[in-house]
Amino acid sequence: MKKRKNIITVAIDSPAAAGAGTQAKLIAKHYNLFYLDTGKIYRYIGRLKLKNQSQFSYNLVKTKIKNLKLNYLKNKILLNNNVAISASDVAKDKKIRNIVHKFQKKYAYNPPKKYRGSVLDGRDIITVQIKDAMFKFYITASLKVRAKRRYNEYKNLNNKVPYPEVLKSLRNRDKSDKKREYGPLKKTKDSILINTTKLSKKACFKKIKLIMDNKLNN
Ligand code: C5P
C-alpha cells in the first residue's frame, strides 16, 4: 500500500474505558490529525450480527465495510453494552479482523489531505496494525476505575446499566481481548505506558503532549 510521506502517526492500544478515546481526540485536535476509533468498526459489525443473526456472513461484512461511511460510526446505538459484547465476540475472528484491517490502514497511512497525519486507537494498533507508528502509547487504568467511568457514561446516555454488570462486562471483555488468538491486547516494549487511574484527562494529555512535542521539535 502506498503511504503518504512525512505524516505524524499515533497508535494507541488500551483495554476498554481506560481513556484512550478521550486522549486520541485531544491529540487529534491539538496536532490536526485524522482520528479513527477502531473499536467502533468492530461495534458496527457486532451490531450487524445482532440484527442479522441468520444472514450474518463474511460476505455481508465485506460488503458493509466496503461501503462503510465514517458517519455510520457516529450512531449512538453503537455505544450500547450489548453491542460492545457482540463486538468483542466478532473481533476474535481472524477473517473479520482482516476485513477491518484494510479499512483501518487506508486511513492510518493516507488520512484526508487536510490532516497532518492520523491517530488510531484500539486493541491491536500498536502490535499489528501500525507497528511503525511515530508514537505508540499503551493507555490503561485499574478495572474498578474503568468500570466507574463506563457506568457514568451509560448513565449520561440515559442507558442505565447497574455497576456490577458494567464491571463484569469489562472484566469479561478484558479477558476475551487479552486471551484471543488473533491480535490480542498487549503492551509492546516500544510503546509508552500511560496509567490514567489517578490522572485527570488534562494531566494525562499534558504528559502525552510533552512526549510528542519533545520528539516533534527535535
Ligand atoms: O474500544 P471498544 O470498547 O469500542 O471496542 C469494542 C471491542 O472491539 C473490544 O472489546 C475489542 O474486542 C474489539 N476491538 C478489537 N480491535 C480493535 C478495536 C476494538 O478487537 N482495534
Image (spheres, rainbow, N blue to C red):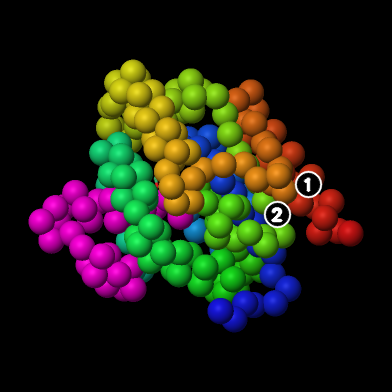
At a point 69% along the width and 70% down the height, the residue shown is: 7
Residue lying farthest to the right in this orientation: 218
Residue lying farthest to the bottom in this orientation: 2
Is 166 situated above or below 115?
above
Looking at the image, do the residues carrying marks 2 and 1 touch, with CB atoms under 8 Å apart? yes
Residue 153 visible at all: no
- Which mark is in front, 2 or 1? 2
Give the residue type that dot 1 points to.
Ile
Q: Main secondary structure of the magenta part?
A: helix
> Which range is magenta?
38-67
Name the element at disc 2: strand
Residue 140: image x %, image y %?
Answer: 58, 34
Residue designated by label 2:
135
Rendered-image quadrant of the C terminus? bottom right
Residue designated by label 1:
211
Give the residue type that dot 2 points to.
Phe
- Marks 2 and 1, how far apart in space? 9 Å
